Amino acid sequence: MLNLRDFTETELEALVREAGQPAYRAGQLFKWAQSGARSFDSMTDIPKNLRAFLSERYTVTPPVELKKQVARDGTRKYLWGLSDGNCIETVLMEYKHGYSVCVSTQAGCRMGCVFCASTKGGFVRNLTPGEILEQVLYAGLDAGVRVSNIVLMGTGEPLDNLDAVLKFIQLVHNEKGLGIGERHISLSTSGLVDRIYELEKQALQITLSISLHAPNNTLRSQIMPVNRRWPVEELLAACRSYTEKTHRRISYEYALIRGFNDTDACARELVSLLRGQLAHVNLIRLNEIAESPLRPSTTETTQRFCNILNKSGVTATVRRRLGFDIDASCGQLRRKFELNGGM
Ligand code: SAH
């Protein structure tokens, strides 16, 4: 069965025509699907024969909530079961400016970053646009809030599933659905340089985040295999090109790992790499995961690193760790679930 939420309104028009129905039904259907309808029967203004036609070919059944955790700071983490038995995780966070949902774009991941739990079980499959969208939709419905921001920073490499991600951005933008604009969407990548150029061609207004985590190739290649294919110089050239084209500031993610990438020398090297660029550095103390011996830097070292950047004209902030008590980061919930064969 095809997921009705994978279809744009225009695609739905073709679909209702095929069923011998007028095009305006597509708008109604899109609204129902995107507002969270769980069955065709609940779509009361759709004629019964069209509902029957659709229910034989398509589904609007949401993912199953396998587990939900609510942290002391209000962060909610969901583990969803998909129709084929795979599971994915989603996080809903509350910020001063509203609610933000962090979505997964793949089941598993093939990037192999040594510090990341999401990649430890390997790559399983790409998510469809509708499966990415349902994470935003059902997290918002569950919490009873309007989601205003989306970060593509859950499990998976969004640029490794670019077509689905682009369609998701288009779907979520439609006012008949969630109506979330490009400027409220951030996409994080480990640095697939060829895809950054492809994304640039789309001229979107989304925020691009780069998982940099090291200021040179020697260090970066040790923790991120992608760096052996696309080294730091090529990555930064793609970023410069991206900002020239879109005039959007790029965010650089930098997880501070004790004794590895947190020295003053590393901070200065990072400054020379980024100075003069339209950039912002997000520093985060590494989240410890079971499968890796890497440890977070101390809060003092983190602050010191941050100060060096700011004093040298590279804007940097230390990111709060939300949902720390519920494994809300980096694929840890899904990983535990997999290892335990369910909870
Ligand atoms: N594949 C994409 C998006 C998913 S990861 C990417 O690599 O950007 C989202 C962010 O969490 C990335 O910046 C990633 O490097 C970071 N991350 C993964 N594991 C982490 C950990 N243990 N501690 C801190 N940050 C981590």
Image: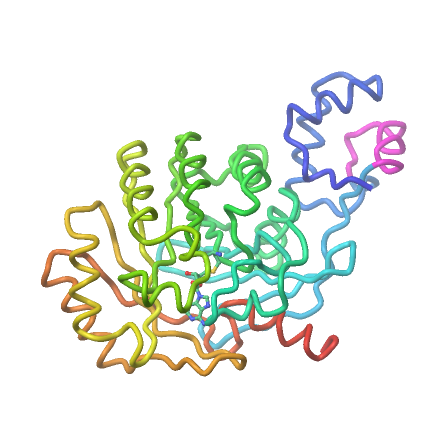
Magenta span contains residue 44: yes
Q: Which residue is drawn at 66% across and 26% down?
A: 27
Magenta extent? 43-57
The kind of secondary structure the magenta stretch mainly shows is helix
Residue at horizontal 45 percent and vertical 83 percent from the top: 293
Horizontally, is 197 left or right of 3 in the view?
left
Give the total number of marks visible in the rendering: 0
Q: Residue 303 falls in which quadrant of the image?
A: bottom left
Expressed as whole percent of the image width and height from the top left, the position of residue 114 reads 47, 70
Decide if residue 257 is on the left or right side of residue 108: left
Which residue appears farthest toward the left when viewing the image?
311
Residue 124 drawn above or below residue 258:
above
Residue in the foreground of this view, choosing between 43 and 69: 69
Q: Position of residue 248 (x, y in %)?
A: 29, 40
In the rendered image of this protein, does residue 259 appear above or below residue 195?
below
Residue at 54 percent across and 71 percent down: it is 117
**Which residue is pictured at 72% across the width and 44% down the height?**
37
Residue nearest the observer in this picture, 135 or 271? 271
Q: Quadrant of residue 89?
A: bottom right
For the residue pair 69 and 81, the one nearer the viewer reads as: 81
Question: Considering the image in quadrants, where does the N terminus appear?
Answer: top right
Q: Position of residue 75 (x, y in %)?
A: 49, 68
State ligand 1's quadrant: bottom left
Percent of width and height locating residue 244: 26, 34
Q: In which quarter of the image is residue 121?
A: bottom right
> Which residue occupies the foreground of this view, 337 or 12?
337
Q: In this view, does 53 lie above or below 322?
A: above
